[in-house]
Structures are given as structure tokens and as C-alpha cells.
Amino acid sequence: MTPDPTTAPSRAGLAGTIALLAAPALLAWPLPRVVSGFDPLPLITGAGWATLSGLAAVVVIALSITRLPVGALLAVLPAIALVAGHFLGDQVPALENSAPLFTLGSGLAVFVAASCLDRGERHTLVKGLTIVSLLYTVPALLEAAVGASSVGLAGTLQNVGSTNQAALPGAIAGAWIGICRRGAWRWIGFTALGAFAVHAAVSPVIAGGLAAAAALVAAALGSPWCQEIRRMRGAFGSAAAMFVFVAMLSAFPHNDDSRADVGSGGPGVVLAVADIDPVEDATAPDDDLGGVGVRLRIWGALPAMVADAGPFGFGPGGFQRSFPPYRDPAEARASELNGELGAATEVEHAHNDWFEGFVELGWFGGLAWFAFLAACLAAACASITERAFGRAACAACGIAVLVNAAMHSNLIANPAASLQAMAVFGVVAGTRWGAPLGRGRARLVALAPVVVALAAPLAPWRLVTHGNALARSVRANLTLAQGGLGESEAAATRARATQALDAALVASGRTSSTALELALIDARRAGDSQLVAVLGERLHAVRPFSANAHTQRGLAAIAIGDLRAARIAFQEAAALRPHDPACAFNEVRVTLQSGLATAALDAARAAVARGALDSERVSALARDAQLGGWVGPQTARELLELAGKPLTPDDLIERADKLRDQSGTTPTVAALESMAQHLWGREHAQVGNYGIAVRSYRQAWRASCDAGQPGSPLLRLELAAAERLSGNPERAEVLLEASVPEGQVTLDLPHWAVGALAN
């Protein structure tokens, strides 16, 4: 049976309908990946393509329609809220954070255009959604099956959740086509539905399965065809049951190797941090992980954010920039798999588009956005009871998208999914409230200046050029990492990578945090400390609440020898990410290097108590403190005791002997021996046995030099003092010829040594 026979759309209307899906199809192009391949930020670049294609679709449809339905006016309030949030909310300088502005702006224009589609054009839209879904899921499943690339199930969007969101509307449209149509399109529809189900199960994406099940249950219960024909009700019910099973299957633990992001696979080579040993760099690319527990903790922070957002919010795209101070450390640990992920994560969005509007658009704008989504849901629930095929299919797609939006950010942060969603919302709103407003063409064209104002001055194209430049930089660095290049060819490739990165910075107005991080890595490798400092400050200005930005700022301060500024930056990073081992390590280490023994011990005890520092990192801190001579041996020993029982010098020697038997003379062995002899030297000198103290100090000095280090400056000065007090001033003078390392704030000298060296 084929209810509601199709009417042929006009040629112009058909072109406009196809244009509505141009950006999602373009971003899904699976073979050469000319659009999103190697792009560290495919969804950011996608926002530019979505805006440009959305504007094109609006123009084409505006030239072909003769009426504008009342339902199109639903877009007015969220459009006003978007503009008000952009100009009156907190300013968001980073180019990446402007993507939601253009995604939603073009999406609302698409909503208005889709509300004008006639019956035949709606049928074409439903078929187009099905094809788009196949473009996302089938290549991803094939690549995961054959292992053709590191992207796998994540697809061209480099994230399984984003790919699943982009494929969801077409999967539901495929279910309607498969159940309600015959011929080749029936099998195309069932293929889209099945491919989506398999992708959701193996990825896994629980929310996608639940959203699909909700839409199919609504179809089984509300469609008049299902009420009249039991076979159709059974088909929709069986499909819904399949997705319930998919959601249950997705809840079991899965191997996470299928998740591809900028921290793995190809782009990860470029984003690997230059060795700044032994300071740890917590700037591993941010990933976005889900899970019910994680979402509950993120949602728990929303009331405080909304209260602070004020009437106009943090600005479109401001969630990621503003969320870190509100983040629950338990959620961060869960997102990072208790440290097993090996990368710092950052929450890019609220995982709930219904309420994120209150954060980014403020109290009034959030209410307008919520009302818009609620009206679309009401229109979808009403339209699914209609006999019109295109309208009912779009209604089911809309229900699935809106359910998914309660657990994901498929409307605000995913342009590939957002444009499809806005198109189906426009269909259901335009048919539910279809009374014409008069000469619709003039009214629709009148909306163009608003969209153009949002897009000016060609900001969507800046997003595209920025993403393309980053992708070129990634490709060049991958070529370098693979090796096998001659000296001249390697130099040329390196120059291409640098030029591409400069182009990305220019396109973003030097506000792209990703490009700034990559430029910082290059500057540190080149040893340009002044450029490192400038880029570090610029990154901090763009991302003031990012632990990542504070860490980069601290590393930049270390590069120019400013330990005080580095300590402040690392303290701020640790305050934002109290659970992060790298942030805690950096804070304690730079405090030790500044010679602030008490403050360093307090910070280390607090970090151990909250589980941020393990015994291995504490031992490394004690080793570096002893060999570097930053603090006295008592402080270094107290650090070791944080990870175990109290230690005597004999215990330290015994531990050093065991480690030497296992792996020879390592820096750790040298530090333990040096620490023990240093403690003995101080004990002897304290009671006036300077001759015996000299022997202990000499052994401590030799041990510190055995590690391939220049020797502890603190040990050198104490040995010089002991030599002078034991009657060997000539030896003392030789030792005093060397200077204290640059950047050393103070030295933990005992009182007897200060007195001996006073002259």
C-alpha cells in the first residue's frame, strides 16, 4: 500500500530541496575526504560550509515559492535571541567558538525555507535524508570492518557521536520509506535503518538508539495507517524494539579503539607536544566523552552556570570557554577513564540542547530557544497523526532529533545534523500552521539581510579557510613524521606546514586556540622564547578558564626563565583541574624549583590526598628536587615519604642498591645516594664535625654528577662552606667559581653554611 501519492515538485523547488542537504552530504563525502580530511576541527569547518549552503538553499527556495506559512514565524524569537546573545552576551573571541552562531543562524534560515516546501518537495526531502544517512554510516562501517584507516566508525566527522547524530534523521526517514513504500526505495530505506542500527550498537551510542526507538514508537501508536493496518504497526513496533535492543547492547563495555578524534590517528602526530622534560604538558587535544554518569554531573553544573549567565548569557558558543570553573572533578575523571585515556578532556557543550540555550543566550534567549523546540515537538507530535507521507515522516524525524537533543548537542554543535533537523522542523511547523501570510517571497527575502548580518564579514568562509589551512598543516607534519625525506624535501615540507599554520592564524584573526597551541609547539621546538611568551599570553586571553591555556602559559614562562609567572599559571591550571596529575605535577615542581619548600610540600600533600599524584610522580619530584638542588634533602625525603613509610639515610642507600642491581646507575639511584649522603653531611656539620661532613658532601656531589647532571648547586655551596670551615679555603674558592643557575629564586642553605659563605 502506498498512501498519499507523490506530487512532482517544480524544478526550482527540487533544486532548493537538494540544496538544503548540500552541506550534510558534502561533509559526509567518504572517499577523498577533500572537505574534512585531516581537519582537527571538522565540525568547525562544517559550520562554515553549513552556513554557506544554507544561504544558497534559502536563495533558491525564495525564488521559487509564492507563500510563507505562519509556522515560519517560529524562527523569529530564537533569531532575535541569537543576535542579542551575540552582541549583548559575553564576548567569545575564539573563531572556533563562533561556529554555533553560524550553525544556528543558517539553521533558522533553513527552517523558514523548509516551511515553504510543497508535498512533492517534502517527499524529495525525505528521500534525500535517507541518502545522507547512508553516506555517514555505510563508509564508517566499511572502514571499521576492513581497517582501512584510523578513522573507522567515527567517520569523516572524527567522532562516533557526531556521525550518529548526522545519520539519525535519515534512518527514521528510511524506516518510513521501507515500511510505507515498495520497489527499490523500500530496500534503500531499510538499508539506511539497518546501517544506523549497526553503527549505534557497535560504536556504541546509546542515545541514538533510544531516540530512534522513541520516534518509531510514536509512529506505531500515532499514525492512522498503523491504526488501520496491523502489519504497519507491527513493522514500526519491531523496528522500535530493535533500537531498544541496540540501546541495551550499547550499555555494555566496548573497546574504545573505534573512537577517532584529534588525539589519535593521523592528526595526533601533529598535536604531540614537544619534549619539555621534565615538566608535563597537559595540552593533549581535548576529547568529548559521554556516558549517563558524565551527563548527570554536567547537567548538575548547569543551574549555577545559568544563574551566572545573566539575561544575555555567555554568548553563542560560550559554553566551552566558560564551563571549566563549574566542572565537577569526578566528571572529569570519569570522562578521562580515571587517567587511562591519556589525554585531558574538555566539555565542549552541555550535552542537552534544550537547556544549553539558557547558558549561551541568557535567561530570555534561553526561554525563546526552549519555546521554539517545544513548539517544534508539539507540531511533530500532531503531524505524525496525519496521512500525508512526507509530513508524517518528517514529524517522526523531528521527534527523534528532539529526543536526541536532550542527551546530545546535535542542534547547536553539529552542523551536519543541525541543518537536517531544522529542515524537518520547518516542514512540520509549516504544515501544522500553514495559513499563508501573503506575498511570501518578499517576506522570505526580507530575512536575507538578517542572515547576511550574521554571516558578515564572510565569517563562514573564514571558518572554512581556517579548517583547510589546519588540514594542510596536519598533512605536512604527517609526512614529516613518517620520515624517509631528504634534507631539502624535509625542509620544504616543514616550510609548508609553517605557512599553513600561519594561514590558519590569519584566517582566525589569531584567535584560534587550536592554531595557537600548534604555533606554541613550533615556537618551543625552535627555541624562540619571546614568541613562546607572546603566544602563551594570547592563548590565555582567548581561553581564560582553560587549564590547557594556563599550562601553555606556564610553559611559556619557563621558556623565558620567569618561575614566578610559571608558578601562578600552573596553580591556576591545578585549581581548574584538581584531579589532573600533569597539572599537580607542574604546580609542585615549579614551586620546588622556586625554592619554596614549605609551599611545595603543602601542594604535594594536597595533591596526594585528592589522588592527583601517585608514588611514581612523587618519586620523580623528589629526584629532580635533589639533583637540581632546589630544596634541602629533608624536603626531598619528605616528598618520598608521602608515598610510603618514614625513611632514614640507611633506608635510602638500601633502596638505591636494590635499584642499581636491577637497572644500573640511573638518575633515581644517583638521587637516592646523593640524598642520603647530603643528610649525613648536614648532620655532621650541625655538630661541628666539618672534616667528616666534607667526606659526606663529596660523596653526595659525586653521586649527583653520576646522573649526567651538572651537579646540585646547593650541594656545591654547602661543600664549599664545609671545606672553608674544615681549613681548606682554596678548595672552597674553586667550588664557588661556578654560578647559581639562572632562574633559581633561593637556596635552602643551613645557617652554618650561610655564615661560612658570608664573606
Image (spheres, rainbow, N blue to C red):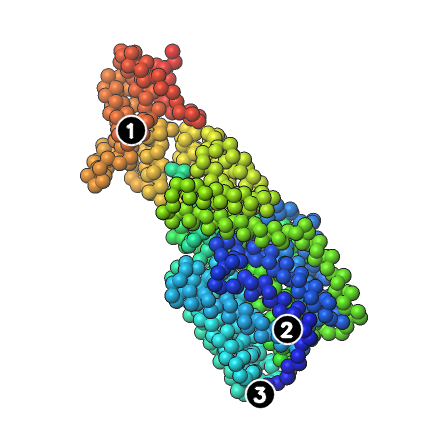
Q: Which mark is residue 756?
A: none
Q: Which mark is residue 1?
A: 3
Report the residue at 54% width, 52% height from top: 468
- Give the class, few, some or many, for how many residues have Cα within 10 Å of label 1's Cα (few <14, many ≥20): many
Distance between mark 1 and mark 2 Cα atoms = 74 Å
Helix, strand or loop for disc 3: loop
Helix, strand or loop for disc 1: helix
Left or right of 76, for residue 461: left
Image quarter for residue 78?
Answer: bottom right
- Residue 709 visible here: yes
Distance between mark 1 and mark 3 Cα atoms = 87 Å
| Disc on the earlier residue, 1 or 3 | 3
Q: Which residue is mark 2?
A: 380
Helix, strand or loop for disc 2: helix
- Residue 377 visible here: no
Expressed as whole percent of the image width and height from the top left, the position of residue 509 reads 60, 44
* 185 lies above or below 539: below
Circle 2: residue type:
Ala
- Give the class, few, some or many, for how many residues have Cα within 10 Å of label 3's Cα (few <14, many ≥20): few
Report the residue at 67% width, 54% height from top: 455
The answer to which of 149 and 178 lies nearer the viewer is 149
